[in-house]
Amino acid sequence: MIASQLAMRYAEALYELAAERQALDGVEKDLAGVEETLAAHGELATLLYHPQVPLAAKKDTVTRVFGPQVTDFVLKFLLLLVDKRREAALPAIVREYRVRANKARNIAEAEVTTAMPLAEDDKTALAAKLSAVTGKTVVLNTKVDDRIVGGVVVKIGDKLIDGSVARQLEALRAALLKTEVRKIGVTY
């Protein structure tokens, strides 16, 4: 809980400074690049997040690796996180920043789960339908999970739309288990 509150505070401060500088998109792009780099290079993430690595080594590494690819503003933010020993909160800070930036741009992210990959036409149609319902521009993050059997599960913020075949089968099963079975007289 404390870690998420910490991430929210840092994200809010970063968001306010980025908004003041009219650099919401640039900061988000830089943060996404940092995330991708850390995900692609596990040893770099280990070095950055390990508590026993000296601050000077972390700061030097951050400056060398991220200095050429991010703006001075984002680099200073990353170095501040290292100075305050908050670098482990970076993934949560990036998530919280993205939420705030999307809210400012009237964008909603939808997590869409299907049993099979969606065709581009289907993605476009689903995004348009969700945009019409929410009144926001909807960006889809799709994933495939064959356990839902068929249909689609959409999560936007704290709302869940479960149109999966697995849920419908479970509802049918529950209804059948509740139904009292009576002996029916059958003659041969």
Image (spheres, grey):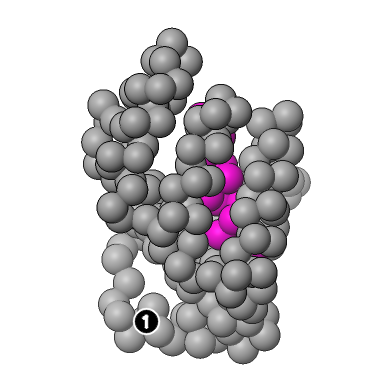
Type of secondary structure dominating the magenta stretch = helix
Residue drawn at the location 35% of the way across and 22% of the way down:
57
- Front in this rendered view, residue 96 or 145: 96
Q: Bounds of the magenta span?
A: 88-100
Front-lying residue, 101 or 153:
101
Question: Residue 89 lies in magenta, yes or no?
Answer: yes
Residue 81 x %, y %: 55, 35
How crowded is the residue under tag 1: few (<14 C-alpha within 10 Å), some, or many (20+)?
few
Q: Left or right: where does residue 184 sit relative to residue 138?
A: right
* In the depicted structure, whether residue 181 falls above or below residue 152: above
Amino acid type indicated by mark 1? Asp
Coordinates of residue 8 in the picture (x, y in percent): 69, 45
Which of the 4 quarters of the picture holds residue 47?
Answer: top left
* Identity of the residue drawn at 35% across and 40% down: 63
Q: Is residue 135 above or below residue 15?
A: below
Corner quadrant of residue 53: top left
Residue 45 at x, y = what percent?
35, 31
Q: Residue at x 39, y 78 (%)?
A: 123
Q: Nearer the viewer, residue 160 or 26?
A: 26
Residue 24 position (above or below residue 175): below
Residue under circle 1? 122
Query: Left of 99 or right of it: where is 139?
Result: left
Which quadrant is the N terminus positioned in? top right
Q: Residue at x 48, y 80 (%)?
A: 127
SS for callout 1:
helix
* Residue 144 location, quadrant: bottom left
Residue that extends furthest to the top in the rendered view of this protein? 52
Q: How many numbered discs sit on the rendered protein?
A: 1
Residue 27 in view (yes/no): yes
Q: Position of residue 42 (x, y in %)?
A: 27, 31
Say if residue 161 shows up in the picture: no
Determine if the magenta segment contains residue 44.
Answer: no
